[in-house]
Amino acid sequence: MDKNSALPLVVLAEHFARLPGIGMKSAERLAYHVMSMPEKDVREFSEALLNARKNVHCCPVCQNLTENELCQICGDVRRDASTICVVETPKDISAFERTKEYKGVYHVLHGLISPIDGVTPDKLRIKELLKRINGNVAEVIMATNPTVEGEATAIYISKLLKPLGVKVTRLAFGLPIGGILEYADEMTLYKALENRNEI
Amino acid sequence: MDKNSALPLVVLAEHFARLPGIGMKSAERLAYHVMSMPEKDVREFSEALLNARKNVHCCPVCQNLTENELCQICGDVRRDASTICVVETPKDISAFERTKEYKGVYHVLHGLISPIDGVTPDKLRIKELLKRINGNVAEVIMATNPTVEGEATAIYISKLLKPLGVKVTRLAFGLPIGGILEYADEMTLYKALENRNEI
């Protein structure tokens, strides 16, 4: 957008451009789109931004995002609190919930250990996880991504958990369902071979 | 986002998903990103949305978006008001201004004639263009896109303008600079051949 554009539009485009994955061209397009939206919708969008940022906070137990005192999962007595699934982000919880199989609870780290990006273990919610470990917790499932950072974080946390006498497991890695063997990368195929099961 | 997510986050994601080119997955990612933004930035973003929608309006002369009474171009006495460049959207003005060659003024139609989408000529700012035609206007340049709708709109407006005794021109079509002849589509090549110039 150049100096001939109306200033409030330029400012709005700059705000859009600061969001991840939105370049300046898309940001301009979005700013122009806002001009064509009913004023009521823009007001609601504006309020939704403030409302989300102000009223959503971390659940004091599992660190998932919530607007209530406890998140919906921690507040649900039907969930099995003896199994904790440790994930990187709140989005990962949605992925597990979609499977409708997992009945345990979660713990959100809000990141992965990555010294190169300045993310040291003390920046993650690891202390909060350790505090949750008591006689009632039977298993902690490390469900971080199968990346260098995800693996490192899983190993780091499992070393802290094991002395507490809790069983620590890791998600299985192998061929994705519906995937084609020919197109599987070497690491996936290696893991699928290594973790093969008798049928 | 599922029912386990905090409601204000779901609402925010839905607002993002209503923007053009943003799917539900991206919208969720954006909503989560907002949670990690400093509250001050979120407040400014929220205000920028309202501010753009409330304070930006159409210039009464050229229909470009502006926050002032007249847009910057119409309010600039150094611009040549005898030449009007007719464009589809305010964004097109930015494109022309980047060339730094055009010194005339503009007229924004805010759309193109497209009966299939319910856009009839009366929904465009054509009346406002006709009102601008007086003895001082020497030329109107039709600068709509080289598409079916752009061509139809250019022809429709030129037929209204010619009886008013004003010169109507159309942008040249041909090979783009830096383009490769081998990859040019037939219509572009046909136009480049038809409009060839002696060297």
Image (cartoon, coloured by chain):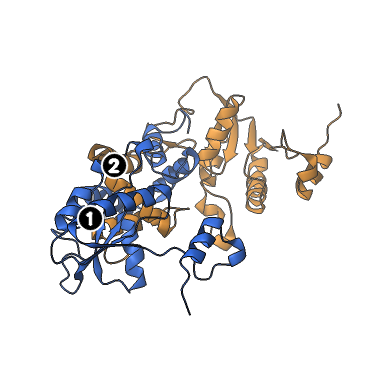
Chain colours: A orange, B blue
**Residue sitting at x 57%, y 40%:** A87
**Tags 2 and 1 touching, CB below 8 Å:** no
- Height in image: B65 above or below B30? below
Residue sitting farthest toward the right: A198
Image quadrant in which you'd find residue A120: bottom right
**Residue sitting at x 42%, y 48%:** B148
Report the residue marked by disc 2.
Answer: A37
**Residue sitting at x 86%, y 26%:** A199
Q: Position of residue A89 (x, y in %)?
A: 52, 43
- Height in image: B172 above or below B146? below
- Which one is nearer the viewer's eye here, B198 or A14? B198
Question: For residue B161, which numbered disc appears in the image?
Answer: 1
Q: Disc 1 sits on a residue from what chain?
A: B
For marks 2 and 1, give the CA distance: 32 Å
Instruction: For marks 2 and 1, give the one nearer the viewer.
Output: 1
- Which one is nearer the viewer's eye here, A184 or A90? A184
Q: Disc 2 sits on a residue from what chain?
A: A
Query: Seen in the image, is B171 located left or right of residue A150?
Result: left
Confirm whether circles 2 and 1 share one chain: no
Q: Amino acid at mark 1?
A: Leu
Q: Position of residue A32 (x, y in %)?
A: 32, 51
Q: Amino acid at mark 2?
A: Met
Q: Position of residue B122 (x, y in %)?
A: 23, 42
